């Protein structure tokens, strides 16, 4: 074996030996692949798979569904006010009486037993109550529409959380790959520098610097791997399966054309289709109908009724006969509470105030939506520009690293130049990953913000 320590390191022969040594080292170098997120053989779940699992078992959706059911019961109750009321009653009475007389000859006992049975039925129908029943039906219907819209918007919120967690897992998975490749690159540079040192063309400090650089990349790799694990835990929690078995995610979900819609079109779409705005609109209409319900006390109330009753009386006295009787009656009643200590007027004022509050809340929600859309639009534009800059920066950083390595090889540069170029290249690649994932997350949030996020499959 050739002993490089015995060779003079100046002149063409030294350059040839250095080149042969580097070729040998690089050809025999092994590159450690990135740890597979989820492990070997782990199943791959697409974003649609994760969304289905999250929407099937979401406690938030179950709570929202129960509230929608409660609202539907309000409609039944409102329609029930148009139906007559039926009341039945049954009475049974046992009567016993004992009389004691005290004559001189002795005591005499007189005893009587009697039984009374009766039952009755009553039918009541409120014919007119100041149009309150119609107002209650309309209010209940709007409350149900609001609950249904809220349920749909809750589905979109759940889907947004899952999409965000999914893209964050893809983000850290890609950053882990960048960390692995950066570590492998640092290991190669250390081997190259050690070869130069053995050949006498670099100093011991260069080797030490590269070793420090390699250890730093190993630390970055540990941090990146830990971020992947935490991101997976966040996704599993968003899917309502915090103890889910490890799986991997589909890298193809990161593909995007970086298209951004016009701001005015986004505003218009949001005001027309966003479910929480529709819910607020229905709630405002329901509160407006409540005013009509409150005004019912200002009008007279008209009711019709019918009664039927039957009574059976019996006694064990010899001279007593069983008596039976029945009676029926019907009629109508008109009542008008002329003065109720200002209760009705107070209720009307309260209902009007609640209607105004609901209207103001709707207006405020619309303004909040416009601000949110503008912010998300700016985030999309910024992420797209960062991605474009990152792609150009990667090409520039790769060329700077090649030049720094060449300058160091011929003795015109330092190890620090190579390390700085390595750091810049790794940073540029990480920035591209961050920009792409930020854009995709902002796009998903925008789809939810304008009301076009289909939480089942599409709309991403």
Image: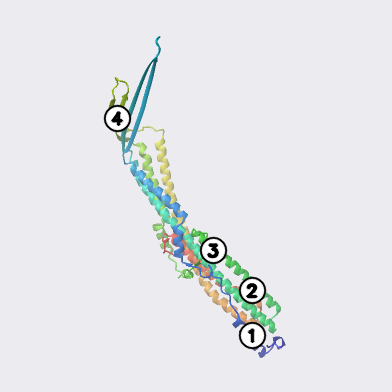
Q: Earlier in the sequence, mark 1 or mark 2?
A: 1
Q: Label 4: state its secondary structure.
A: strand
Where residue 310 is drawn, which disc sits there?
Answer: 4
Q: Earlier in the sequence, mark 3 or mark 4?
A: 3
Where residue 231 is drawn, which disc sits there?
Answer: 3
Q: Are marks 2 and 3 in contact (CB under 8 Å)?
A: no
Determine the CA span between mark 1 and mark 4: 118 Å
Circle 3 crowding by C-alpha within 10 Å: few under 14, some 14–19, many from 20:
many
- Measured as percent of width and height from the top left, residue 338 is found at 36, 32
Determine the CA span between mark 3 and mark 4: 76 Å
Mark 3 or 4, which is nearer the eye?
4
Q: Quadrant of residue 153?
A: bottom left
Q: Label 3: state its secondary structure.
A: helix
The vertical placement of 376 against 414, above or below, is above
Q: Label 1: state its secondary structure.
A: helix
Check disc 1 and report the residue beneath it.
Answer: 21
Where residue 214 is drawn, which disc sits there?
Answer: 2
The vertical placement of 458 against 320, above or below, is below
């Amino acid at each position: 074996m050739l002993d490089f320590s015995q060779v003079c390191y100046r002149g063409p022969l030294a350059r040839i030996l250095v080149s042969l040594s580097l070729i040998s080292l690089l050809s025999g170098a092994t590159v450690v692949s990135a740890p597979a997120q989820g492990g070997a053989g782990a199943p791959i779940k697409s974003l649609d798979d994760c969304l289905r699992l999250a929407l099937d078992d979401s406690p938030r959706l179950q709570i929202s569904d129960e509230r929608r059911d409660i609202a539907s019961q309000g409609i039944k109750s409102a329609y029930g006010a148009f139906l007559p009321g039926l009341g039945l009653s049954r009475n049974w009475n046992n009567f016993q009486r004992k009389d004691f007389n005290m004559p001189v000859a002795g005591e005499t006992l007189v005893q009587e037993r009697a039984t009374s049975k009766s039952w009755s039925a009553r039918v009541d129908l409120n014919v007119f109550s100041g149009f309150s029943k119609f107002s209650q039906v309309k209010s209940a219907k709007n409350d149900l529409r609001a609950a249904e819209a809220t349920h749909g918007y809750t589905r979109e919120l759940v889907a947004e959380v899952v999409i965000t967690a999914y893209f964050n897992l893809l983000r850290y998975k890609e950053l882990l790959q960048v960390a692995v490749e950066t570590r492998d690159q640092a290991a190669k540079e250390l081997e190259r520098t050690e070869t130069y040192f053995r050949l006498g063309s670099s100093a011991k400090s260069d080797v030490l610097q590269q070793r420090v650089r390699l250890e730093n990349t190993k630390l970055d790799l540990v941090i990146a791997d830990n971020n992947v694990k935490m991101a997976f835990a966040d996704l599993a929690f968003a899917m309502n399966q915090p103890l889910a078995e490890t799986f991997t995610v589909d890298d193809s979900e990161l593909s995007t054309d970086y298209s951004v819609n016009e701001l005015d079109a986004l505003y218009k779409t949001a005001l027309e289709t966003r479910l929480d705005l529709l819910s607020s609109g229905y709630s405002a209409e329901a509160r407006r109908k409540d005013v009509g319900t409150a005004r019912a006390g200002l009008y007279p109330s008209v009711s019709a009724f019918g009664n039927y009753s039957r009574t059976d009386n019996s006694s064990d006295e010899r001279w007593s006969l069983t008596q039976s009787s029945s009676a029926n009656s019907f009629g109508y009643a008109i009542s008008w509470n002329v003065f109720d200590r200002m209760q009705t007027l107070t209720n009307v004022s309260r209902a009007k105030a609640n209607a105004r509050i609901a209207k103001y809340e709707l207006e405020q929600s619309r303004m909040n939506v416009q601000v949110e859309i503008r912010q998300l639009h700016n985030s999309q534009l910024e992420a797209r520009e960062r991605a474009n800059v990152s792609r150009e920066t990667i090409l520039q950083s790769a060329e700077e690293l090649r030049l720094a390595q060449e300058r160091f090889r011929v003795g015109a540069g330092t190890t620090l130049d190579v390390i700085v170029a390595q750091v810049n290249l790794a940073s540029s690649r990480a920035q591209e990953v961050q920009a792409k994932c930020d854009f995709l997350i902002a796009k998903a949030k925008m789809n939810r913000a304008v009301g076009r996020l289909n939480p089942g499959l599409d709309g991403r």
